[in-house]
Amino acid sequence: MQLLMALFAGLVFGLGLIVSGMTDPSKITGFLDLAGAWDPSLAFVMGGAIGVGLITFRFARTRSQAMLGGPMPLPAARQIDRRLVLGGLTFGVGWGLAGYCPGPALASLATGGSKPLIFTVAMLVGMAIFEIQDRLSQSPAKKSA
Amino acid sequence: MIDWAHFTPWTSLAGGLLIGTAAAMFLLLNGRIAGISGILGGLLRPTAGDIGWRVAFILGLVAAPLLYQMAAPLPAVQINAGTALLVVAGLLVGIGTRYGSGCTSGHGVCGLSRLSPRSMVATAAFMVAGFVTVFVVRHLIN
């Protein structure tokens, strides 16, 4: 049941990305181009998603268990460190260069031809580089936000 | 100035609500944060019992356009980046999202929704970097 729900959640998430227009990299770069012809659409995507999210997380705080079992993941406040900021900045440069972030790239893989595939393979290589570097430096990575 | 020809407030808002709903289901039912880079990156550090849900979620995400296509033609997309740029961008996104512990979904949607100071800082960082990058590429280089 958990796997089925995970599949369904991924499916709905992907449909949301397509409906919102976020699988089109030119809409992302259009949003990031403040000095040019600015497309504010992405702000509406974030607004809609965060609107639902604010209610959800408020409700989630009142529960200690997920409905299908397992603990509710509510990470405690943690340090704002160099790693967080530099990681965010690095991601932002890549995001601005191609107009892809991880979700839309995956939601474009099956139908988008070679470009999202090239991006996704490079992204996985980047993630692997992080894993190798992280293991060598022996500082255990923090769990994802 | 606003690019009215490409601005899609209503479909973008509707898509955002769908994304929020998916993240809500995943949190309340499965007890998981819908952060794509974390879900994907965790597969490169496999631990027992922690693989199935990641694969299932990603399969759903990948299958979404196939399902969409059954109902309506997929929206047209325009990818300006060539192969070399896609490779560089992919590497930066892969490395950056893992070091920064999240991307647009994990920090931008889920993190901001739970008012996490870490996620606010991370989101500000990748937004600013994105704004600057596009400014440099479009208005200084080209």
Image: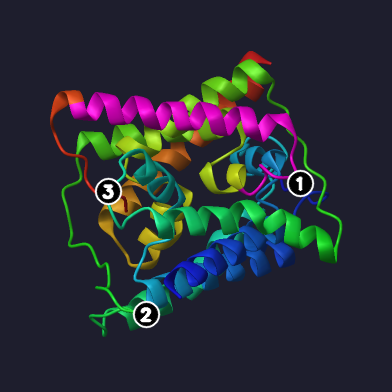
Q: Is residue B49 visible?
A: yes
Residue B53: quadrant of the picture: bottom left
Across and down, in percent, residue A94 comes to 51, 29
The mark found on residue A89 in the picture is: none
Kindly report the distance in space between the C-alpha atoms of the residues bearing marks 2 and 3.
Answer: 21 Å
Magenta residues, start to end: A107-135
Kindly report the distance in space between the C-alpha atoms of the residues bearing marks 1 and 3.
Answer: 46 Å
Left or right of A8? Residue A130 is left
| A66 in relation to A35, above or below | below
Which residue is disc 3 drawn over? B47
Q: For residue A140: magenta?
A: no
Which residue is disc 1 drawn over? B3
Which residue is located at x 37 percent, y 29 percent? A128
Looking at this view, is B94 or A41 the one in front? Answer: B94
Which residue is disc 2 drawn over? A68
Looking at this view, is A108 or A92 the one in front? Answer: A108
Give the residue type that dot 1 points to: Asp
SS for tag 3? loop
Residue B72: quadrant of the picture: bottom right
Which residue is located at x 38 percent, y 62 percent? B33
Give the residue type that dot 2 points to: Leu
Left or right of B65? Residue B110 is left
Marked residue chain, label 2: A
State the predominant SS element of the stretch in magenta.
helix
Q: Earlier in the sequence, mark 1 or mark 3?
A: 1
